[in-house]
Image: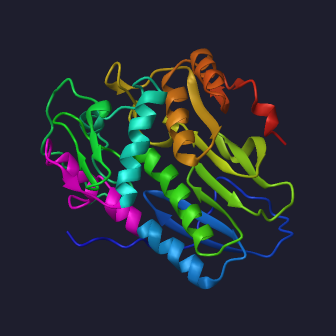
Amino acid sequence: MEKRKIQQLRVRAIISAAQDLKTPSQRIDFKAMGTSFFCIFVGADQTILDAVFELANDLENKWSRFLPDSEVMLLNNNPDIPHQVSDATLRLVSEMKLGFELTQGLFSGKVLGELIETGFANSRSNPENFTTWKAKEKSSADLSDVAIDQAAKSVTVPRGVAIDAGGIGKGLAADLMSDYAMQLGAMGVAVFAGGDVAIKGMSVEAAGWRVDISNPNDVTKFIASVELSRGGLATSSPMGWMIGNSHHIIDPRTLKSSNSNVIQATVIAQNASQAEILAKMCVILQASEGLARINELGVAALLVDEENQVHTSENWETYSC
């Protein structure tokens, strides 16, 4: 299959940065990974903007489950065999294994089959692209059994397990894109990838980067705002992708769409990929249990329940503005 290029265009952002930009900045907007990206840079030239855009393109081609020749699907469809992969995919798999540990298995590599069966096999942005997991099989293996050989730069996925970049791919892409911009000489950057945000370096305002949290029932309105000087933020909701009464966040305990009282979770963590993992955990768990785990981990979260009540972690006010 010919690798598809990301179409670069202007999009309306659901998450907004501060509009009163007091430091000269640059911005690019585009579609990638089935969502809207926008990146705001401080002290970057066109070369940096182009390089970051191309990195997003490259990561989608490596990680998409809708492309049979992506590194992710080559791993999934050739189980029990070590395969050399890029540094980016090594990082992806490492973050996924960490997510499995942090969430006590709620971030799982065992739900791709259920996603496909529930109707989420096709790409939303390009429906002609679809997921083909030829090696699907029941097994007792899980993400902890995925082997990484850093020296050989190889990954071995056991039979019955499937790597699905999904939400974590967007968060990690934001992390890697922001890192890359700084390496190339930007003074600061905020990468917004759908509901995920990665922040590095100088901001356009002295107080930091302002991020507005959308109302899950009306994305044109906001329920909270935070200011971040570094790190990552992710917002997850089962309402983001639904087919009939089913949604795309599968509870590995039931192998069905999660059925908690949380309709949206926003998490602030040390990077966007970890924030994304923990936001998914909070959507799967009941609000009280999710907040308890968030407080144990020392990160921050804001949850909205099915009665539109807002629940915050012990340290949320540290970031609130």
**Residue 251 % position (x, y):** 39, 25
Q: Is residue 184 above or below residue 195?
A: below
Q: Is residue 134 visible?
A: yes
Q: Identify the image quadrant of residue 189.
A: bottom right
Relative to 233, is 2 above or below? below
The residue lying furthest to the bottom in this view is 46
Does residue 162 belong to the magenta stretch? no
* Residue at the image position 41 percent from the left and 51 percent from the top: 91
| Residue closest to the eye, 160 or 188 | 188
Expressed as whole percent of the image width and height from the top left, the position of residue 49 reads: 58, 77
Q: Residue at x 60, y 64 (%)?
A: 38
Q: Is residue 274 above or below residue 55?
A: above
Nearest the viewer among 271 and 277 is 271
> Considering the image in quadrants, where does the C terminus appear?
top right
Per the rendered image, the range of residues in magenta is 58-86
Quadrant housing the N terminus: bottom left
Is residue 199 rendered to the left or right of residue 99?
A: right
Q: What residue is shown at x 35% (from left), y 55% (from top)?
A: 89
Residue 4 percent coordinates (x, y): 32, 71
